[in-house]
Amino acid sequence: MKIKFNEDGLVPCIAQDHKTKDVLMLAYMDQEAFDLTVKTGLATYYSRSRQKLWVKGETSGHYQHVKEIRYDCDCDTILLLIEQEGAACHTGNRSCFYRKLEEYKGE
């Protein structure tokens, strides 16, 4: 398996609760973040805004312990099945996906 990083050297990464299957967040990884995640078992991402690596939870204490790593059929998206300590979202919500588009009816 060879992960396909985009032209910026990044790959999208979805963090999902390994028990509930709730989708908690989406972030990006570069090769170094991916390698560190595999090595340490802690979700490590690349911050596009800060232009540096970050271990989820290193400042908040809300670590993501990786239970399994999956990738999609095209090898261009990573799925981390994780055990989340505390909130996944920087807003304090368990998931970053706590808002619903009320106008959308799905028709």
Image (spheres, helix red, strand yellow):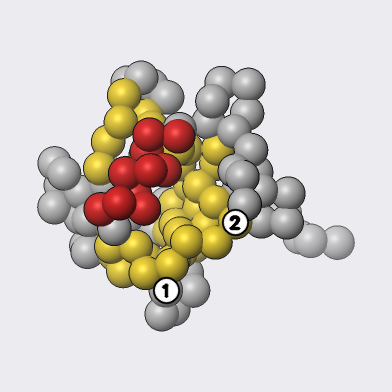
User: Which SS class for mark 2?
Assistant: strand
The tally of labels here is 2
Name the foreground residue: 19 vs 74. Answer: 74
Q: Which circle marks residue 18 in the picture? A: 1
In terms of sequence position, does the residue under pointer 1 or pointer 2 come before the other? 1
Above or below 96: residue 20: below
**In the image, what residue occupies the spot 43% across and 67% down?**
68
**In the image, what residue occupies the spot 30% across and 31% down?**
53
Task: Estimate the x, y position of residue 76 in percent, counting from the top left.
Answer: 65, 43
Position of 70 compared to 17: left or right? right
Residue 63 location, quadrant: bottom left
**In the image, what residue occupies the spot 25% across and 42% down?**
55
Q: Is residue 92 visible?
A: no
Position of 27 compared to 104: left or right? left
Which residue has dot 2 on it? 71
Q: Amino acid at mark 1?
A: His
User: Which SS class for mark 1?
Assistant: loop
Residue lying farthest bottom? 19
Task: Estimate the x, y position of residue 3 in percent, counting from the top left.
Answer: 59, 43
Name the foreground residue: 36 vs 28. Answer: 36
Name the foreground residue: 58 vs 76. Answer: 76
Above or below 85: residue 25: above
Q: Is residue 29 visible?
A: yes
**In the image, what residue occupies the spot 66% across and 48% down?**
75
